[in-house]
């Protein structure tokens, strides 16, 4: 029985790696954004690296998709063929930070 345990664990890990999931979407993905309160650090921790940066990184942009369950970040999809493209993008999230790296304003702009 003891020899079977490593084999069972290996098979479980292999099956878990084969599981397919859709984009990690959520209706609440962007709810943490509060103008005048959210820090750039919080944004980077929650959303990861921005798709684009402007004005010495005072403006960050993210490519956002939307499905029946909510919004998802295109750069987090496990689809290397879609990274860096606007395929599946429905919105661009634009975040503007002040000189103290606090979110001054944000906007979810439709792209189609």
Image (spheres, helix red, strand yellow):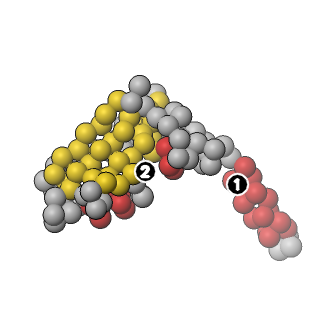
Q: Which residue is mark 1?
A: 17
Q: With respect to residue 1, does 46 lie above or below?
A: above
- What residue is at 78 percent from the left and 64 percent from the top? 10
Tell me if I can see residue 102 in this picture.
yes
Residue 38 percent location from the top left of the image: 21, 56
Q: Residue furthest front?
A: 55
- How many marks can you see? 2
What secondary structure is marked by label 2? loop
- What residue is at 43 percent from the left and 51 percent from the top? 51
Question: What whole-number distance in Å separates the C-alpha atoms at marks 1 and 2?
Answer: 27 Å
The N terminus: image quadrant: bottom right
**Left or right: residue 26 compared with residue 39:** right
Which mark sits nearer the N-terminus, 1 or 2? Answer: 1
Give the image quarter of residue 54. bottom left
Q: With respect to residue 110, does 60 lie above or below?
A: below
Mark 2 neighbour class, 10 Å CA radius: few under 14, some 14 to 19, many 20 or more? some
Residue 25, numbered label: none
Q: Nearer the viewer, residue 38 or 92?
A: 92
Q: Nearer the viewer, residue 11 or 95?
A: 95
The C terminus: image quadrant: top left
Residue 51, numbered label: 2
**Left or right: residue 18 compared with residue 112:** right
Mark 1 neighbour class, 10 Å CA radius: few under 14, some 14 to 19, many 20 or more? few
Q: Nearer the viewer, residue 84 or 78?
A: 84
Residue 15 percent location from the top left of the image: 74, 52
Residue 82 percent location from the top left of the image: 58, 42
Tell me if I can see residue 69 in this picture.
no
Nearer the camera: disc 1 or disc 2 = 2
Residue 57 percent location from the top left of the image: 30, 60
**Left or right: residue 60 compared with residue 72:** left
- What residue is at 53 percent from the left and 34 percent from the top? 87
What secondary structure is marked by label 1? helix
């Amino acid at each position: 029985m003891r020899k079977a345990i490593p084999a069972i664990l290996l098979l479980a890990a292999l099956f878990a790696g084969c599981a397919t999931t859709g984009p990690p979407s959520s209706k609440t993905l962007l709810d943490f954004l509060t103008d005048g309160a959210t820090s750039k650090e919080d944004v980077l921790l929650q959303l990861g690296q921005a798709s684009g940066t402007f004005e010495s990184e005072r403006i960050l942009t993210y490519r956002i998709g939307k499905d029946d369950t909510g919004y998802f970040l295109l750069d987090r999809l496990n689809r290397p063929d879609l990274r860096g493209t606007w395929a599946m993008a429905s919105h661009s999230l634009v975040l503007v930070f002040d000189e103290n790296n606090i979110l001054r304003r944000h906007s979810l702009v439709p792209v189609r």
